[in-house]
Amino acid sequence: MVTFSLERTPPLAPDEAWRRLTRWPRHAGAVPLTRVTVLTPAPTRVGTRFVARTGVGPLRFDDPMEVTLWRPPADGEPGLCRLEKRGRTVLGWAEIEVRPGPGGRARVRWREELRVRFLPAAFDPLLHRTARAMFGRAVNRLLRQP
């Protein structure tokens, strides 16, 4: 199991940063070889479920997730979304927090706990570096693309 955190201060208002980070199908364009399917009707709320399928051919896995906390930013208050990973292979949670930052810009914090079933703890340092790099690039892409 690994836990990591990323922070960004994009040149976006908090509402726009929140929109870009929580439109789940957009994550497919930010994570290579991934397709995202939302399983519940819009809008996003507690109970929204979606699946990120990553891989190619027979080398792929599903990462089903459910929104367990949904509080968009409003009236200067930070927004917070918590996702629980409900898969057979990938377990854990992710939290996306968006708050007002310096100069009206958003301050984004992405926290994640990640477990890969059957992966020995000896691989945790490699999993930590890989996940942090992959999610860091994904967050950067999501925040850059309108």
Image: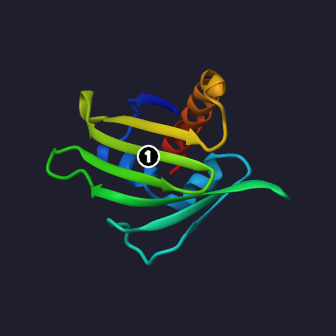
- Residue at image position (38%, 30%) is 9
Q: Secondary structure at mark 1?
A: strand
Residue 124 is situated, as x and y percent measured from the top left of the image, at 60, 26
Residue 89 is situated, as x and y percent measured from the top left of the image, at 63, 51
Residue 56 in view here: no
Above or below, 130 relative to 51: above
Residue 38 in view here: yes
Q: Where is residue 72, by image quadrant?
A: bottom left
- Residue at image position (41%, 37%) is 110
State the scheme by which the image is colored: rainbow
- Residue at image position (45%, 38%) is 112
Looking at this view, is 55 or 10 the one in front? Answer: 55
Looking at this view, is 129 or 18 the one in front? Answer: 129
- Residue at image position (29%, 48%) is 80
Q: Left or right: 26 with respect to 78?
A: right
Pick out the residue farthest to the bottom.
41
Q: Left or right: 130 with respect to 19?
A: right
Residue 65 is situated, as x and y percent measured from the top left of the image, at 49, 58
Pick out the residue farthest to the left.
75
- Callout 1: 10 Å neighbours few (<14), some, many (20+)? many
Residue 31 is situated, as x and y percent measured from the top left of the image, at 64, 46
Looking at this view, is 98 or 88 the one in front? Answer: 88
Q: Left or right: 36 with respect to 95?
A: right
Above or below, 15 relative to 139: below
Pick out the residue farthest to the right.
57
- Mark 1: amino acid: Trp
> Could you tell me how many numbered marks the image carries?
1
- Write down the residue under mark 1: 93
